[in-house]
Image: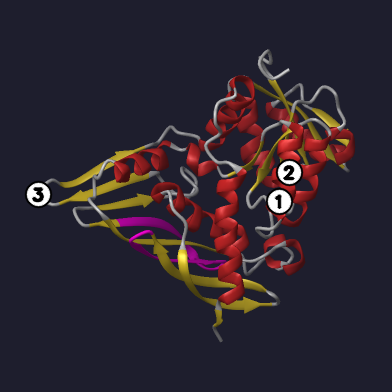
Amino acid sequence: MGARMTQIRWGILGASKFAREHMGPAIHAAKGAVLSAVASRTPQSVAPFKDFAAGCRAVMGYDALIADPDIDAIYIPLPHHMHVEWTVKALNAGKHVLAEKPIAMQADDFDRLIAARDASGLLAAEAYMIVHHPQWQRARQMVADGAIGRVIHITGGFSYDNSDDPQNIRNQAATGGGGMRDIGVYVLGSARYVMGTDLENISAKIRWESGFDTFASMQGNMGEATYSAYVSTRMHPHQEMVFHGSEGLLRLTAPFNANIFGEARIELHQPNLGLRVEKFPAANHYVNQVEAFGHSIRNGAAYPWTLEQARGTQEAIDTVLAIGTDLT
């Protein structure tokens, strides 16, 4: 199937707002992909998908979709705590799987995911879209090429405020709520992607609310570089990553929600050379992600973000949540 497949027929588990606004249109727009079906308990919730993908079918129930012989790959935008269960079910049903981040609630869950992936021989990955954006690919290359010399310190921040939406799954401990599980993957995973190493010697401070974290600051080191970052679901919206080196500084604007939060740019500050800015106004990392996934299925190419890489980020998240000192 894989090598001869020309168009990958995608099915989406659940008619979520994010799937409707971002990943559904991305699948439809991606080369070599077609949005074939959306599973939902309420067929009317699939209607908005048909506005941009006329051939999209409504399928009643998740089990029916993963059993559908006319579907090749499944995208899972379900609440965090459901990702592992449905990723494994879809793999066992013979489908490739792209599951939203975080694909697991704790690092140990990856044992099941990796075992199911290897047993099936299919592709399973976390939808960590930023590694498909040229802003981050370029930043990684710049650091590797020594554009800022030796990296000495990394800082990061990602925040939003959803305090006015108490029913949101991100404000429910039982559904994997809290800032670390929702957006911790960004400040941690992006730095790991650029540096090629894990966060060690971790310390953290956390503010808790009803069993989930609304603010977390974390420190540690990545190789010889020190690292400091925070995430919050109770602060004015902000996102930024900075890599500070011995011979320059790299600053990434809108690094996690490019073209939504703001324009994706790289600012390279170097002595005597001043400031160089690279902009990426046209890039859509969601479309790039779907196309990279399809390329790996068709041609066996290495996927840019493996389950093993995702596990490393989850291990750091687990550690922060386990050892963080409570903030009153």
Question: Which residue corresponds to the image point at 61% horizontal and 58% vertical from the top-left?
Answer: 182
Residue 9: horizontal and vertical position, in percent?
73, 23
- Check disc 2 and report the residue beneath it: 115
Q: Which mark is residue 135?
A: none
Q: Is residue 235 visible?
A: yes
* Residue 47 position (above or below residue 323): above
Q: Is residue 215 left or right of residue 272?
A: right
Q: Is residue 4 left or right of residue 283?
A: right
Q: Is disc 2 surrounded by few (<14), some (14 to 19) or many (20+) residues within 10 Å?
A: few
Q: Earlier in the sequence, mark 1 or mark 3?
A: 1
Q: Is residue 283 left or right of residue 151?
A: right
Q: Secondary structure at mark 2?
A: helix
State how far apart marks 2 and 3 are (Cα): 52 Å
Q: Which mark is residue 272?
A: 3
Magenta segment range? 223-243
Q: Earlier in the sequence, mark 2 or mark 3?
A: 2
203 or 166: nearer the viewer:
203
Q: Secondary structure at mark 3?
A: loop
How did the renderer colour the structure? secondary structure
Residue 138: horizontal and vertical position, in percent?
36, 38
- Seen as rendered, the residue at the extreme bottom is 328
- Check disc 1 and report the residue beneath it: 111
- Quadrant of residue 28 in the image? top right
Q: Is residue 78 left or right of residue 328?
A: right
State how far apart marks 1 and 3 are (Cα): 50 Å
Identify which amino acid the numbered label 2 is placed on. Ala
**The C terminus sits in image quarter:** bottom right
- Quadrant of residue 71 in the image? top right
* Residue 321 position (above or below residue 223): below
Q: Is disc 1 surrounded by few (<14), some (14 to 19) or many (20+) residues within 10 Å?
A: few
Residue 253: horizontal and vertical position, in percent?
38, 50
Question: Which residue corresponds to the image point at 46% horizontal and 61% vertical from the top-left?
Answer: 199
